Amino acid sequence: MAEKKKTGGLAGITAGETALCTVGKEGAGLTYCGYDIYDLVDNACFEEVAYLLLRGELPNAKELEQYIERLKSMRDLPSKLKSLLEIIPSDTHPMDVLRTGVSFLGNIEPEDNEFLNQATVADRLLACLPSMLLYWHRFHADEQKINVVTEDDSVAGHFLHMLHDTPPSELHRKTLDTTLILYAEHEFNASTFTGRVITATLSDMYSAVTGAIGALRGSLHGGANEAAMELIQKFDSPEQATKGVLKMLEQKEKIMGFGHRVYTTSDPRNSVNKKMSKTLSKEVGDNKLYAVSEAIETVMWNEKKLFANADFFAASVYHFMGIPTYLFTPIFVCSRITGWAAHIIEQRKNNKLIRPAAEYIGPSLQKWPSKK
């Protein structure tokens, strides 16, 4: 009898089919609906990428204009949701805020039982997740009930405008827009697979997205950029960073932001984030964080042959734009909602309940003990 293959964490197991993304495929790398990530970063805006994932094709100029206006019209929050965000404690993790907000929105704006309004639900979440996050943040951090409807023509511009009370520079808007493109989709990652498993039970989109947010909240999935920022800020110079990380490795401490479950030699998103980090470091006159980041990257490659993933340089990118560290992972949600919703819609097209088998490793059949 052939020995069963051990597959901890389902590594190497193909769990389904998708037309949305390739990750680490030879000759393709990271693609969305057949488009290379570098082509999308160089030529598209995030709204075009969202349209591509959710509709299956790139919009023409008129369709893009209409889609941007559609998203702008869906940014506002119901008064009941605002009231809920106001009573969520200020020390709550922002990922928990989004999880609760999405679940509550599903109560007051439910998806119909036949899922006929699934595209509307997807667009609504894409439009209002930044509003949800920043309304809560500004209410508790600045004691302001901000206006979550802005005239900005992009999700990135809208986010930064709400955060800083002023429209962002084009450099900052474009930079955040690029990170949203990079994070939009990534095949059957933990949060996306969670969403598909929930969807496969014929549950609604809000439930699937709420579950996906819960999966992304974990430090092994979405929290690496926050951990990377905390690490980078520990050191005052590249030399100190080199010594410090070497000591951490010697003590077998985990260094977040390096390596990847699928990629083997590099994360294609890292080079884009690294370049943007360097540009922003020059803009703000930083002579420490970027250099420290490079030093840590060098140590991790020289000592462990581990490459920086998309999260590592994204940390300093967000920091240089004045984004608080605890909002880093929620930005991931504001982007990945496109991939999640696209996978939910795709799963429904040819749905089968996802129910893998498990290898039992407990005790053999036992007799019930007799009473004495």
Image: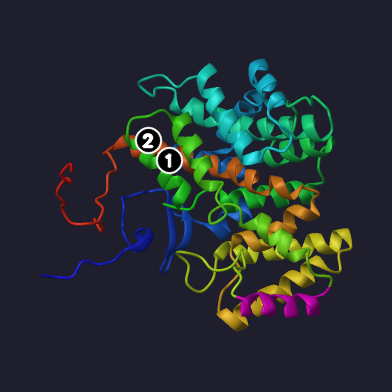
Q: Amino acid at mark 2?
A: Thr
Asked if the residues shown at circle 1 and circle 2 are in contact, with their CB atoms under 8 angstroms apart, the answer is: yes
Residue furthest bottom in the image? 302
Which image quarter: residue 291?
A: bottom right
Q: Position of residue 74 (x, y in %)?
A: 62, 24
| Vertical comparison of 27 with 339: above or below | below
**For the point 40% across and 69% down, which residue is it?**
26
Q: SS for tag 1? A: helix
Residue in front for this viewpoint, 240 or 152: 240
Q: Position of residue 108 (x, y in %)?
A: 54, 17
Q: Quickly name the residue at label 2.
A: 199
Residue furthest front in the image? 372
**For the point 74% across and 80% down, which residue is it?**
243
Q: Amino acid at mark 1?
A: Gly
Residue 58 seen by the camera? no
Quadrant holding the C terminus: top left
The span picked out in magenta is: 237-251
Secondary structure that dominates the magenta span: helix
**For the point 68% across and 31% down, which residue is it?**
131
Residue 269 appears left or right of 161: left
Q: SS for tag 2? A: helix
